[in-house]
Amino acid sequence: MSKGIAITGMGIISSIGDTVEDNFHALRSTVHGISRIEFLETKHKDAIMVGEIKKTNKDLENTLGLPAINSFSRTAMIGAIAAKEALDNAKIDSIDKYRTGFVSGTSVGGMDMTERHYLKYHEIKENRRYIEAQHAGFTTESISNYLGIRGYVSTISTACSSAANAIMLGARMIKAGKIDRIVVGGTDALSKFTINGFGTLMILSDEECTPFDENRKGLNLGEAAAYLVLESDEIVTKENKEVLGRVSGWANANDAYHQTASSSDGEGAYLAMKKALEVANISSEDIDYINAHGTATPNNDLSEGVAMTRIFGEDTIPTFSSTKAFTGHTLAAAGSVEAVYSILSLREHLIFPNLNFQTRMKEFSLIPQTELISKEMKTILSNSFGFGGNCSTLIFTR
Amino acid sequence: MSGCYINGIATITAQPTTDPNNFLEDVIAFDEVIFRATDPDYKAYIKPSAMRRMSKSVKMGVTTSKIALASSCIEMPDAIITGTGMGCKQDSEKFLEKILHNDEQFLTPTLFIQSTHNTVGGQIALGLGCKAYNVTYVQGAVSFETSIIDAHLMLSESPEKNILVGGIDEIAKNSTLLHTLDGHIKNKNINVLDLLDSNSKGTVCSEGATFVVLGSERKENSLAKIVDIETKNAATPDEIKKDIEKFIDRQGLSINDIDAIVLGNNGDIDFDHYYKNLQNSIFSEKEQLCYKHVIGEYHTASAVGFWIASKIFETNKVPSVLKVNNISAQNHKNILLYNQYRAKNHSIALLQRC
């Protein structure tokens, strides 16, 4: 088995909590964060359920101590909060002591500000500082600037697999000795753009989402940011760092089937899981738990389920659950949100349940874990899939 | 470590750069601050039925990826890595405007589906039936370079791979125009060929796509070796100078070994001093080449620097329109590239004749 890359810090803000420990408390107490929209202005307020972080932009600005005139989008603010927690958790106070990088996944970046000001930039001069927020990279720079990371900085935008790809890239860069430590993850805030986009695809549920259920009606959009700190073994030894877990397998494959839909045989997902097991140098029997992508759309859960049966065998599939019913689908952040939950599962020997499941899907016999259970675990597999056929799998070990 | 060779390259820019027999000898003189790419005959590369649904980014990306793959004699790449600063901004902008003008009603999914940043990478994979690694980087002016860094890393992990890497950006009418309000784009039209001496704030904006096919081994059709590449998000001009010196030193070379430098000067009086600081010091005795007064500025414009270096190695010619000093190198071996945008997203790359 591959030793993997050390995770020395993590941070998260989501609709179930502002910190790692708040998220853990909610997961352990089975308290979800799905509600009606309170803060975002949209016509669809009462038509859908979402995982909204119950903080205004002003609250977030205060948390970060930003000046009144700033150009942070909501996506950048939640990103900065989670990334800062990750750095603090890793006890990093001097960024420049080692070659430190930052890779952030996002799908819409500063769209929340663009859609708010777009039609009025000509009239209102003071809002023009947000024009640049229409570039996703600007969101990442707002965060890296806040953290003081000036070296390698990049943004990955592969829709809902963005953060998983960011973690993968960070692990590869450390493994190759290209960088000493790197903050990796993703951030996405709710926006009218995504709500209406997913709305046109008819995959938004008007109820709490029900992953892997026969009668699933679609997903709940969510907003979140989550980051991991990955560090080289040299630093871990030298600084006597606590290692929270390791990223030991990773892979990215393309379904090459349709721009937005997943194939019926789950080929992309199958390839991603298969290759990740190869990178980790383990077999499918070594997986103790799967944190599934499980968005609760008819298409995803079927395609992913088929891919899982192809990898693990329908009757020998490990315990699995989707945590999307807690947080909603947090899009580009989903991969790192679920990475944090996977590390918590490893730390606490707990499997967080797949909420709202009632009826087995007719296509296969898979039943997700629906209650919180304790289980001794060494290895967890986590899936993230996105538009453009992008499928990614990560494997975490104790 | 294994090498990283450019085995095929193609670029669509505002100039007719898809014409293999015209290496910027005849250039178009633009006189607006926002100017579009010179379209090749897309029908020669894309079926009309498929083309109807394609946005400009997808058309430019699919076409240049096909030309690059053909010139490298690779049919199926082992990874597809794309970089874009703006993404599929035209469709994204149209969808946003429909939301805002129609009060979130009467929307259809097509524009949304095609609005994501990874649309070009996804469409190329779909067209080729390529199920391999597929990632999209969106980091302003280093969107292309971060893609190359990923490919460079991948070739060190898996030397047998052939990797398709591209940078794509398109002009979107209103979103691009907004940058005349925040000072990124000049607010008066100019003769673009005089851009570098414009002596005013902001720059111009254009669009294009550049694709390369990279492999770890030198082949008969290899055009250049990408020796190394590095990006830095924020730095002062003097830090950049030191970074470049360290970068060259790390390759076991000295400034003397560099034959020419390709710089991203874009005529913005507030930021061109990053380049001038190098032009007037460590590179004062070197052949200096600039290209944004020819092809314009956009987030992945710097990819054209890779094309220029490759073409110089291939043709042993340097287009006079690119020259900004009186020094001419002979038989170029090492060409250094440096680019930045508004003091951020710096990239340094070294290309070598192979």
Image (cartoon, coloured by chain):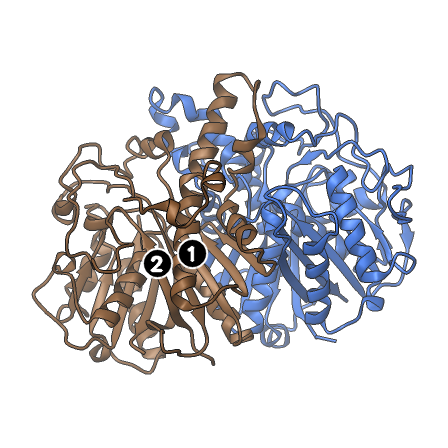
- Where in the figure is residue B334, as x and y percent of width and height? 26, 75
Task: Using the image, tell me which numbered label, if any, was put on residue B10.
Answer: 2
Task: Using the image, tell me which numbered label, if any, was put on residue A26.
Answer: none
Which comes before the other along the chain, label 2 or label 1? Answer: 2
Q: Amino acid at mark 1?
A: Ser
User: For mark 1, what is the residue?
Assistant: B65
Q: At numbered mark 1, what does the secondary structure look like: helix, strand or loop?
A: helix
State the residue at coordinates (53%, 62%): B79
Q: Amino acid at mark 2?
A: Ala
Residue sitting nearer the eye, A245 or A178: A178
Chain A tint in image: blue
State the residue at coordinates (70%, 55%): A267
Residue sitting nearer the eye, B271 or B3: B3
Label 2 marks a residue whose chain is B
Q: Is residue B282 above or below residue A73?
A: below
Chain B tint in image: brown
